[in-house]
Image (cartoon, rainbow, N blue to C red):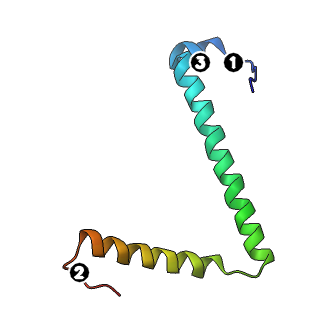
């Protein structure tokens, strides 16, 4: 989809058209991720899931896996 917006000429002149386009594109991608995270959080709350504990467990498992692959001399938990 194409969207036309008014932009100040001096801003385009300072940043450049491509850089400005990339900044807007990056903002939209972050906003899409933020909305997806919000949807996940709302769904988890509705189901009674504790995301803090879920994330803690996932981080712990990921760290153990990383240690196994890249730091074999460290003990796993």
* Rendered location of residue 54, percent (x, y): 58, 78
Instruction: Of the two numbered discs 2 and 1 on the same chain, state the one appearing first in sequence.
Output: 1
- Label 3 environment density (alpha carbons within 10 Å; few <14, some 14–19, many ≥20): few
Residue 25 image label: none
Q: Which residue is mark 2?
A: 74
Q: Is there CB contact under 8 Å for labels 1 and 3?
A: yes
Tell me the SS state at disc 3: helix
Q: Which residue is mark 1?
A: 7
Task: State which quarter of the image contains the N terminus.
Answer: top right
* Rendered location of residue 69, percent (x, y): 28, 70
Q: Which residue is mark 3?
A: 11
Q: CA distance from mark 1 to mark 3?
A: 7 Å
Extreme residue toward the right, this view: 46
Residue drawn where x is 57% and y is 31% of the image: 23
Residue 50 higher or lower than 34, as above or below: below
* Left/right of residue 29 with respect to residue 4 in the rendered view: left
Q: Quadrant of residue 47?
A: bottom right
* Rendered location of residue 71, percent (x, y): 23, 72
Q: CA distance from mark 2 to mark 3?
A: 52 Å
* Rendered location of residue 11, percent (x, y): 59, 18
Residue drawn where x is 67% and y is 81% of the image: 50
Mark 2 against mark 1, which lies toward the viewer?
2
């Amino acid at each position: 989809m194409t969207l036309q917006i008014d932009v100040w000429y001096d801003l385009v002149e300072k940043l450049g058209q491509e850089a400005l386009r990339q900044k807007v594109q990056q903002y939209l991608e972050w906003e899409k991720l933020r909305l997806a995270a919000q949807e996940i959080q709302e769904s988890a709350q509705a189901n009674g899931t504790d995301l803090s504990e879920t994330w803690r467990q996932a981080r712990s498992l990921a760290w153990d896996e990383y240690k196994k692959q890249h730091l074999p001399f460290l003990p796993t938990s």
